[in-house]
Amino acid sequence: MLDLILDTMASLALACNVGAAPSRRVAVRRRISRVACAMDLDNASVLVAGGGGCGLEVTRRLKDQGSWVWQLQRTESRRKEIEGMMAIVVKGDACKPQDVDKAGRGCGM
């Protein structure tokens, strides 16, 4: 299961690239649907590291499934958009273990 999730995340990251072909994005959506069916995310606490295009899309999908989402952000530039989805913004850098630990404690991990 973890392999499927990691593979899906990698595919989503590739599809979020500016030059991704529409057919590639469709394939990624199908993979995400498979993972969503295999996991019960309703009322789950999830930490999303990064709030760029891919991170925002992951947050939207998690919120649509009923998850509590904490999003680790280096900057404040997308705070309003993230909070508009009822997600929680945690200031920090995903490359710094202490920031990830702080965010993880905030969401009960």
Image (cartoon, rainbow, N blue to C red):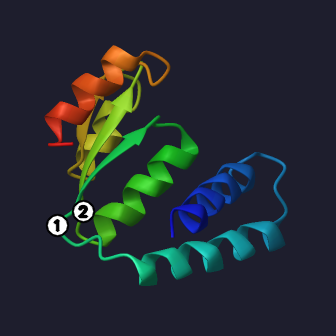
How far across and down, in percent of the image, does residue 11 sit?
70, 58
Q: Is residue 2 above or below residue 103?
A: below
How far across and down, in percent of the image, does residue 83 sit?
24, 42
How far across and down, in percent of the image, does residue 15 sit?
72, 56
Tell me if 48 is positioned left or right of 105 in this view.
right
Q: Quadrant of residue 93?
A: top left
SS state under label 2: loop
The residue under label 1 is 43
Q: Residues within 10 Å of mark 2 (few under 14, many from 20)?
A: some
Tell me if 9 is positioned left or right of 44 in this view.
right
Tell me if 47 is positioned left or right of 77 in this view.
left
Q: Earlier in the sequence, mark 2 or mark 1?
A: 1
SS state under label 1: loop
Q: Residues within 10 Å of mark 1 (few under 14, many from 20)?
A: few
Give the amino acid type for the residue marked by disc 2 in the picture.
Answer: Ser
**Mark 2 in CB contact with mark 1 (< 8 angstroms):** yes
Tell me if 101 is positioned left or right of 106 in this view.
right
**Residue at point 39%, 59% (across, down):** 60
**Residue at point 34%, 26% (across, down):** 100
| Mark-to-mark CA distance, 2 and 1 | 5 Å
Q: Quadrant of residue 26?
A: bottom right
Q: Is residue 65 above or below residue 101?
A: below
**Residue at point 45%, 37% (across, down):** 51
Give the amino acid type for the residue marked by disc 1 in the picture.
Answer: Asn
Residue 67, numbered label:
2
